[in-house]
Amino acid sequence: MATRTVDESDGKRKREEEREEARREVDAAMAKFAAAELACSEAGAAPAALLDRRLRSAALESARRGLRAAYGKDDAAPGPCPRCGGRARLSRRGKAAVDTVLGRVPVEMARRVCRECGRSWRPRERLLGIEGSMTPSARRLASLAGLEASYARADGLLRELSELNFGAKRIERATRAAGADLEAWRSAEPVGACGGSLSGEASKPGRKLCCALDGTGVPALPRETAGRAGKDGGRAGTREAKVGVLWVSETDDQGRPRMVEGAAVLFGGIESAAETPGEESPFERRLLRELAAAGCAPQDVDVCVGDGAEWIRRLFDDWFPDAARIVDSCHAAEYLWAAARARHDAAGDLAAAWAGKLCGMLKAGRLDDVLADLRRRGGDVEECRRAVGYLAERRDRMRYDAYLAAGLPIGSGIVEAGCKNVVGRRMKCTGMRWTVAGANPVLWLRCAWLGGWFDHYWDDRVAELAA
Ligand SMILES: [Zn+2]
């Protein structure tokens, strides 16, 4: 016992000394840079215009020296075996190259082996939160770049912006790992802990809690679409990403609906919303989870808007039977325009005039007149019959006059913008083909980043490491 106490205080003193040494290194570097002439000479015969760039490189190099000193000697307590709790013995010490936000530095890591079960591990890896040879801060940068741009572009950006040479492949690995971890964290998070402000905002007078859902195709590798029929009857080239938005709506001084600033939650993924007896589908679970995380219950939803797709209709009917369930007015209008173009010369005035009239009647709540007009003037035209079918089947979700009078949103523009931001901008670039396993972590990260809780996730994860 006595020797251990001595050992511990020895280790503590050594760590303190090393920290002091690292501080001295940094101070020395800072003092050097304080003298501009010296810094210039150190940066070489740089043209004045490139001085800031050269100085950055020198500063990073100097900071890496400090980090090397801090990460030099591994004196992390081995602790018990993570598998069986047995006592550890030292196997060997070695240096591993680890990527940090300052660049790559060697980090000494002692490998320990369990005397009982033979398991081997590196305690310092866990202590510093190193995964895939990257520090948490480096992984954070890599996954942020990877969620915003193609991995090759992300690599180029990080080289240029921060002199970091992670490489596209490792950025991809870090992004996918971060996305999967974020999803696990979000699933385990206590209800209401994140985005919990929606319930508060929604309960104010005149406010409505709204939900809009939409789907959009992600170009997929052939093996990901095997056995799935495409829209034209051939094999599908895409997989559908489902996106949802929960938001709080209020009315402006003219009675028009608008989103309450900051009161919105975005979520999505390539996953099934198909009805499965006895259990909730993955997307259904996601919808309910996000609702709960926003501090709300299904019965709190006042309005839902969708394009009339079958899976959206089913989710709305199953979970929000008391809400105003609205078919997006733009989708309804598209059917009317298609009918008018097919009936009359597509580009002609007659088509535009008729479509305009039909849309006006629809918004005024005169659905029976719209249907009668379509039947009378459309006759046997296929598009007119299709419009009649679409409208007649969804008539109780198209009371636009009543919705407008109540200040409810009748368009799903919010979720369509969400699709574009979450999915389109990252997943649908030229030449991209995704696997579901590759796409989903990126979608999850993008929802967190665009939804403003990316920081919350990272801070929470790092706090866990420090604990
Ligand atoms: Zn063991």
Image (cartoon, helix red, strand yellow):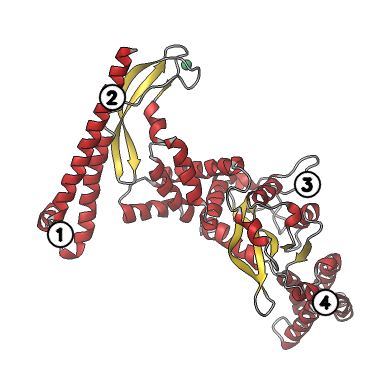
Q: Quarter of the image containing the N terminus?
A: top left
Q: Amino acid at mark 3?
A: Glu
Q: In the image, residue 375 lies at what x, y percent?
A: 88, 77
Q: Amino acid at mark 1?
A: Ala
Element carrying mark 1? loop
Q: Which residue is mark 1?
A: 46
Q: Which residue is mark 2?
A: 11
Element carrying mark 2? helix
Vertically, is 44 above or below 256? above
Cβ atoms at labels 3 and 4 below 8 Å apart: no
Q: In the image, residue 277 lies at what x, y percent?
A: 81, 41
Q: Which residue is mark 3?
A: 275
Residue nearest the viewer, comparing 193 with 36 = 193
Q: Nearer the viewer, mark 2 or mark 3?
A: 2
Q: Specify the label residue 365 is tagged with.
A: 4
Q: Amino acid at mark 4?
A: Gly
Residue nearest the viewer, comparing 62 with 4 = 4
Cβ atoms at labels 3 and 1 below 8 Å apart: no
Q: Which quadrant would residue 191 be assigned to in this image?
A: top right
Mark 4 residue's CB less than 8 Å from ligand 1: no
Relative placement, left or right, of 379 versus 260 is: right
